[in-house]
Amino acid sequence: MKKRLQKLLNLKVKIIEIHPTCKINTNLGDKKDYLKDKTLQDVIRIGKYLILEFDDLWILNHLKMTGSWQIQNHAGQTTEKQQSKLKYWRVRFDFGEKLAFYSDVRQFGILWLYEQDPRIVDNSPLKNIGIDVRDPMLEERLKKQIKEKKWQRKILADILLDQSFVAGIGNIYRSEILFEARISPFKRIKELSSAEIQQLIEAIRNVMRKAFKIEANEYPFEDGYAPKEIEEEMFAVYGKSESLCKHCQRARIERIKWKQRSVFYCPNCQK
Ligand SMILES: [Zn+2]
């Protein structure tokens, strides 16, 4: 998504339309006028958040399950896939030669508008954001952080989704990471051996690297679900309850509802 938006760098917003049912969180009043004539200076990704920096204004966006950005040339044709997404447009930017749509089928995504970089705004969701999964110092930083007292009693299923611990892991990849690390989702941090900590960090890196690679090619999730062929290739446990475990070939994958979300794991491999 970030790469896609970078095609708009240094372009100026000519027209901005906001869908009547779309809410942009801001205390700037009528936000529409504020963005007109502003130039997109930078696109930054932090965990699951995107920051669009315009001169002296910042849009912060959390895509949640189905949010996406579609870019097209003004005179260009839209693909069928884009067409289906344009139906659900929430915000439409006209950058002159290019158009950008923020679309969101289920409308769980959130947009904020700030007069300051959201990384330094007091009550912004980024204020307590944890280590980004793609931080080059991930291993070092996580190893240090994991020893902190406040995390010791937490269980892995919770901690991997806690964006103040590590930023960028969603529900699907939580299950995939723990399967790859061969650790039970219900183990506490303090129960992890140093070998398990190493396995966990490596699994975070590997699984998320694959995830971002797929996303960079073409965001494949329609309506929040990956197409079948991607799911087959990508997911070893997610959505596979009752299937035979790919690793041990003995146990069946179990699904547990945990705090309203599903966790999938192999009870034989993940102890
Ligand atoms: Zn297994």
Image (cartoon, grey):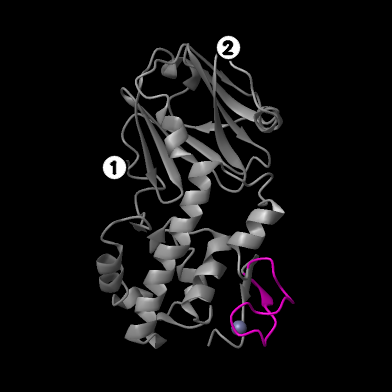
**68 shown above or below 232:** above
Badge 1: residue crowd in 10 Å (few <14, some 14–19, many ≥20): few
Q: Is residue 213 left or right of residue 149?
A: right
Q: Quadrant of residue 250?
A: bottom right
Sequence-first disc among 2 and 1: 2
Q: Nearer the viewer, residue 164 or 242?
A: 242
Q: Quadrant of residue 205?
A: bottom left
Q: Secondary structure at mark 1?
A: loop
Query: Which one is closest to the eye, mark 2 or mark 1?
Result: 2
Looking at the rendered structure, the kind of residue marked 2 is: Ala
Q: Nearer the viewer, residue 234 or 197?
A: 234
What is the spatial separation of the Cα atoms under label 2 and label 1, in whole angstroms?
A: 39 Å
Looking at the rendered structure, the kind of residue marked 1 is: Ile
Instruction: Say how many tags the image has.
Output: 2
- Looking at the picture, how far across and down is residue 120, in whole percent? 29, 42
- Looking at the picture, how far across and down is residue 258, in whole percent? 62, 72
- Looking at the picture, how far across and down is residue 38, in whole percent? 37, 17
Range drawn in magenta: 238-258
Residue 75's mark? 2
Residue at 46 percent of width and 49 percent of height? 48
Magenta span contains residue 250? yes
Magenta span contains residue 240? yes
Res. 136 visible in picture: yes
Q: Is residue 157 left or right of residue 135?
A: right
Which residue is label 1 attached to? 120
Q: Is residue 120 left or right of residue 88?
A: left
